[in-house]
Amino acid sequence: MNARIIGSGNEAIVLAHGYGADQSFWDKITPSLARTYRVLVFDWNFSGAVKDPNLYDSAKYSSYDAFADDLIALLDEFNLRASVFMGHSMSGMIGCIASIKRPELFKRLILIGSSPRYFNDDNYEGGFESSVIEQMFSNMESNFDEWASYFASLVANAKNPLSVEKYEKSLRAMRPEVALSVAKTVFHCDERDILDKVMTPCTIIQTTNDAAVPNSVAEYMQKKIKGETTVEKIDMDGHFPHLDAHLQFLNVLGSVSGFNTHLESSSN
């Protein structure tokens, strides 16, 4: 999983990237975090940055549960307890599940653009109709590179071509069959029932215009999560505030209760 620790603080923060990304998506914020924290970064086994094709098994990883077990094993390997966990997109829900299984491992969950369900449902706005997602899967199978270009321009901030290019390149680094398998795990998930079992304090960070996750999802999660939960919004387009608005992102982190760091002065 290419795991490594940056920094040497007393407390630990774990950064878990989302779908189609890798640990480099944290690069704009890790120097600031490493001034105060031991920062654990890693790549999920589906990432194009992981070169061993045998690590990902589509049957095993057909739900978030196996990812949560991998996260727990990683924290045990590094002997981390009461860590701050920062999960982007799908990793936010993985962190929630892991916190239910092993609450002593987590001090706070920071959930960035995360969603328990992407399909619209009765009295729930997930953001997508099922027919749209099924067509997306079909597009991935028929022309993966073309789909990657389209999806990157949809999800990343179109006003920042470098971010779109970075995400597109990262998507294309995945094996197409793995990308499709993980996409099905993500978009078919329904983790709404686990939210009231999450006792760890949570901070939800949501951009004001995220094509993947509508603002109503953040509000829904805040109401359902049992632990003390706040929502922090960053005024920007796209799904990657830590990439496209990292100074604002660091300022938000600096205001989070119990977040022990001087981020505003170290975010240049």
Image (cartoon, rainbow, N blue to C red):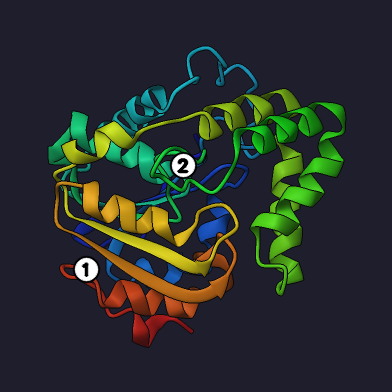
Which x, y percent locates residue 263?
34, 78
Left or right of residue 170, residue 203 in this image: left
**Element type where label 2 sits in the image:** helix
Q: Is residue 137 visible?
A: yes
**Residue drawn at (39%, 22%), measured in percent from left and top?**
66
Q: Nearer the viewer, residue 252 or 46?
A: 252
Left or right of residue 136, residue 97 in this image: left
Q: Nearer the viewer, residue 174 or 64?
A: 64
Q: Nearer the viewer, residue 11 or 230?
A: 230
| Disc 2 residue crowd, few under 14, some 14–19, many 20+, Cα 10 Å | many
Q: Nearer the viewer, residue 159 or 193?
A: 193
CA–CA distance in space, label 2 to label 1: 22 Å
Left or right of residue 179, residue 11 in this image: left
**Element type where label 1 sits in the image:** loop
The dot on residue 90 is 2
**Residue drawn at (80%, 33%), measured in percent from left and top?**
139
**Residue drawn at (32%, 36%), measured in percent from left and top?**
192
**Residue drawn at (47%, 80%), measured in percent from left and top?**
247
Up/down of 61 relative to 253, above or below: above
The dot on residue 259 is 1
| Residue found at the very far front of the displayed protein | 122
Amino acid type at mark 1: Phe
First in sequence: mark 2 vs mark 1: 2
Quarter location, residue 3: top left
Which x, y percent locates residue 111?
36, 54
Left or right of residue 81, residue 243 in this image: right
